[in-house]
Amino acid sequence: MKTDHLKAINPDTRKLVNVLEFIKDVGINYKEKGKEPICPSCNKQMKVYGYTSPALTTRFMHISDSTNCLLSTSSKRHNIFTEADYDHSKGILLRNSFCNEDIVTETYAVAHALCNRRLTVTEYHLMIMIADRRDLWSLSGLTLEVLPYLFVLLIDFKKDSSAYKGNTKRSYTYRFILHKPKKETINTLWKHSQDCFLTRVFVGGHFHGKTIQNPATNNVIKWKISDEKYESARLKHQWISANFINKLMKYCH
């Protein structure tokens, strides 16, 4: 049976699972039980498609309109990839190269640093799923080193609830925006990284769409590509436990 890589949330365990794991845990009669799988991006209910037909690819699908969901191929959120240059012959090779414990950990460590040291396993996995759904691995010239700067462009970083007590609590929802020379495609992010940088904007609320500034200086904060401030995290990730790395690896295949 051929299955899609997209995973969903098991409503009982709240864990990300593939279709076969979901059916094993919940059962094919999940609808009668009222236990529909949940999209990890938009939190809407999903359904299992193609499970009983050997001629179809078994996968999770949205039940209702999903044009605003980041995991939907019809979503217009990532228009920056529409005009990009692709090399599909190398995409599979890059995806396979990524599935290495050192690469997965280093990529996470840099993305974690970019996100002010607040990046969950689920968010990291969501980035990977979006990259898979849109075949971003086939972007022409893409290298493993630049993946963290590409990954953080893929999702919104949600505001933490009042119940969260950690030191890295998010007070608002934000997303990263790529700034590049006009008429250049996303490929310039790694071809001419010196001409690119990232900023953050507010998502939702009174300041929706506005660029986030340093409250002390009122200057726009810029995240420069391959800045040593973030790149140093690539080799300084001893703080990441073996158990956490196992979780990262589980979600990368």
Image (cartoon, grey):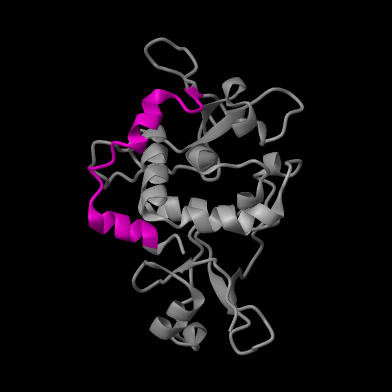
In the rendered structure, the answer to whether residue 23 lies left or right of residue 102 reads right
Residue at 63%, 82% (x, y): give it: 50
Which one is in front, 97 or 33? 97
Residue 85 in the image: above or below residue 28:
above
Residue at 52%, 34% (x, y): give it: 176
Residue 247: image location, x then y, percent: 33, 60
Quadrant in the rendering for residue 46: bottom right
Residue 38: image location, x then y, percent: 48, 67
The answer to whether residue 42 is visible is no
In the rendered structure, the answer to whether residue 23 lies left or right of residue 109 reads right
Quadrant in the rendering for residue 69: bottom right
Which one is in front, 69 or 21? 21
From the image, which quarter does the N terminus lie in? bottom right
**Magenta stretch bounds:** 223-249
| Residue placed furthest toward the top | 217
Please check the rendered image and state whether residue 231 is part of the magenta-colored stretch, yes or no: yes
